[in-house]
Each structure stands twice: as structure tokens, then as C-alpha cells.
Amino acid sequence: MSNNLSLKYTGNPFVDAGIFALKRKLKKPINEITKDDLKEEALNISDIYVTPAWKKNLYSIFPNNVLVNPKTTKKDNLNELYFNELLTLIESISEVSYNGTCVSCGRRDAVKTFKRDYIPLSGSGSLKNYFSFANEGVEYCSLCAILIQFAPLIMYNCPTYAKNEKKQFLLLHSNSEKVMDYWAKDAINNINKQIIFDNFTGCYNENYTNPINAIFNILDKIINLDDLWGDENPSLTFYYFTNFNKGSELEIFSLPNPIFHFLTKIPLNEYKNWKNIIKKEYNNVKWNKVNDKNDFKNKSNNIYNGLLNNHSILRFFYSSKYKKTYCTWKLVKHYIKEVRNMDEKRIDAIKELGDKLAYYIKDKNSKKTLYNLEKASNYNTFRNTLRKVSKNKISNGDNELLFTFDDYVMYIFPEGNENWKETQDLLLFRIYEKLHDWMVKNKYVEEYEDEFFEEEE
């Protein structure tokens, strides 16, 4: 048999994680990885995984594996026992086949039914009533089974302390090799530091316990490794799981493509504003008692939650209470265009209407108009406020239309009462951006916001 493994990505998140971990460890293309490389790296992880912190993690990844099984875990030659198991798998890797029976790659024949001690979230032997066709496990080829053993190297440790939840690890999977390669690079760098300093701390751990915040921390790391993301169109999926013996759990977070594009293309002169908006939206933080990011990074964040759940975050870009904005229209436009998929003509029409309303409020010194725009809680009330402004303009001899009929039905409220709040948010943002200083001077603002702690660069 050829020493070259003819590796290809499989679409299986655990197998592909192992491939990218190996690629980064070996610093070579995957089509050049050999059985000898596998043996060398199998020996390396055998020494890493027997350290206390790694063994603690592996209880929730490979339960009952020789590394954590009570019958073997205290043996002096534990790393040798584990390596010999891996070596047996490596030696049994078969040639590539066009009709392989492995459920992961389909390119080699399955050698046996593997259980959850080797394949996370798979079968558990005799306790098979929860699995398809009462299977004891899953049929994998030797190569895919061995590759999964390297997956923990790029897992992110994020144990939840929520009631009745036990999930612990985040596993990233993407159709973008660039995304996966950059994440593997960062994770393997963390492993290398553990080795260099002889301080083994287990899976990549930055003390996150909130998985959504951890996901955006991972995204920041990946995005900041490169300035050129223009041609990438990645789908990103995060598997949040535990494979602990007392109960396996899995939650899947999918990051839509537009959000990745939005985050990679934030205007440079708006980046600081964006980071401050994020920081402002952490919940239940006593800022006067904050020493560093660790004091708030696991608090629920309105921006992250909104982005991941496809909810509008426009209302967090401004404050009606203080009549101010936290960024410029440039960032707002970038968000509504990339994430909310709003077309250029509609954006321009809403901006123009916002400018006209700002001029009207200032020209008439009309606190009532602003109040009605702010307090409208339904579509009918909001459009009635716009109708009254139009009527007053005509009554006062102002022949400039607030908007045309076509503008109204095509751009201002193209969906009627659907998503009308988005239009309200955009108009209020534009009014505050244009008139904040004037409103402060003319006592539209009754109190002032405390000095906010700016995000550290």
C-alpha cells in the first residue's frame, strides 16, 4: 500500500477538524500527508493527552477511552497503551475505494462499528434504544477514526453553567479552507505554547462560558488574521457539545454568510465605534467595578444575540433617551446592506426622508413631531405621524413633498406593516445624527449619558 493517505475533506466536522489539525501540525498540504506522519503525530498526542488537564477534557470527548477508563487511567504506561491503539488503527488503513462503506468519507471500507469512546455523539454499545435501527455505534474506516483523535486539538473549551445544561466544547466547521486553516493555525499555536512552557491546560481555553460570545471571539481571531476576505463566501457552523457518559448534548449554531461579510468589511474609520457599540450592549454589567474584559465577556450581549438569531440590531446604534448616535450613517448603511439585504435605492430614500424630517423638526422646533416618531409602537401610528407632517408642510405653503406615493410603497414601507420598525430605527438614527448638537442646545435632551468606557484597541 502507498504511504500517502490521499486525504480529502469529508464534510464530517470531527474528521475535518482532525485533518486541519494535522495540516497545521505538519505544515504541509493534506495531499502530502502520509502514514508515517500519522504515526509521528499519534505519538505526540499520546504524550499530550495523558496530562491531567487534557485527560479532564477527554472525559467529555472520548468517554471510556483507554485514557480515561477507570481500569487503565492510572497505569504508568498510559501514553504507550493509547499510542498502541492508534498504531493498530493506522496499520489497518486500507486503499482508497470508489464504493467504500465508511459513513464519513465513503472512500474506504469500514473496519468495525465504533462507539462514543472513539466517535463523539455516536453509539454506546448495548444502550442502543436512542440510535437509528438500534445500532451499537457507527461504521467508520480506520483513517477517519484516527483522524477524529486529532480533533480535540482545535476544539474550544467553553463549559456552560446554565441550569440543566452540560455542553462544553465548540467545534467549528466551514466550507472555507481559509477559515478552517486560520482557526487551526491559532489553535495549534496554543498547543505549541503548552508544549514549549510545559504547561498543559487542555483544549483551547480563554475562560469563556457563554457560547455565543465565544463564537464571536473566535470569529474576531479568524478575521483579524487576514485583511483580504473579499472572495470568500463561507458558511460557518459551530457544534456545541459534550459527549460525557452521563448524557450527550448538542446545540448547533449557524452563522449566515452575510454576517461574516459584514464583520470582514467594517469600515476602518468605524471599527472603533463598532467595538464600542458591542461593549455597550453587554447586559447586567456594573461598569464602575470592571477591571478588565474578563469581568463582562460572558454576560449576554444584545449585538451578538441579534446577529446570530437574524434579528435587527439597528436600535442599538442610537439612543432615543440621549438623542445621539454611536456611529455614523456609513456603518449603518454597511449593516443594512450586507446583513439586512436592503437595496441601495431604499437606503437612499429612507436617508432622504430622515434628512427632510430633521429639517422640519428644526425649522418648526417641533418636539411633538419627534416625540410621536419616537413613541409610535405600531405601523398605523407611525405612518399617521408622517401623514400629519406632510399635511402640515402643505398647510404652511411648503411644496416640497415629504415623499412620493411610489417612494412610500416601494422604498419607505415596501412590506406594509412588516418590518416597519426597521424604517423607524433608520429615520430616528438619521434625525439624531443630523440634529444632536442642536437638540442639546435647545433642551430636547433632559439628561446626559455618562462617559462610556471606550473599547481598548
Image (cartoon, grey):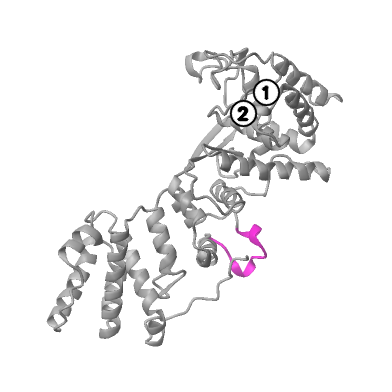
Task: Determine crowd level at label 2: few under 14, some 14-19, many 20+ residues with C-alpha closer than 10 A.
Answer: few
Which is nearer the N-term, disc 2 or disc 1? 1
The quarter holding residue 147 reads: top right
- Residue 376 lies, in percent from the top left, at 27, 66
Q: Is residue 453 above or below residue 231?
A: below
Decide if residue 83 is on the left or right side of residue 147: right
Q: Residue at x 52, y 13 (%)?
A: 99
Q: Is residue 451 above or below residue 147?
A: below
Q: Residue at x 57, y 54 (%)?
A: 227
Question: Disc 2 marks which amino acid?
Answer: Lys
The magenta stretch spans residue 291: yes
Task: Determine crowd level at label 1: few under 14, some 14-19, many 20+ residues with C-alpha closer than 10 A.
Answer: many
Question: Viewer-proximal residue, 303 or 90?
Answer: 90
Query: On the image, numbered disc 2 is attached to which residue?
Result: 246
- Residue 130 lies, in percent from the top left, at 50, 20
**SS for tag 2?**
loop
- Residue 368 lies, in percent from the top left, at 26, 78
Q: Residue at x 50, y 45 (%)?
A: 232
The quarter holding residue 37 reads: top right
The quarter of the picture where the N terminus appears is top right
> Is residue 164 in sight in this rendering?
yes
Q: Residue at the right extreme?
A: 76
The quarter of the picture where the C terminus appears is bottom right
Question: Viewer-proximal residue, 147 or 54?
Answer: 147
- Residue 381 lies, in percent from the top left, at 22, 65
> Is residue 280 in sight in this rendering?
no
Q: Which mark is residue 192?
A: none
Q: Which residues are magenta?
A: 284-296
Residues at marks 2 and 1 touching, judged by CB atoms closer than 8 Å = no
Question: Disc 1 marks which amino acid?
Answer: Ile
The magenta stretch spans residue 60: no
Query: On the image, numbered disc 1 is attached to which residue?
Result: 146
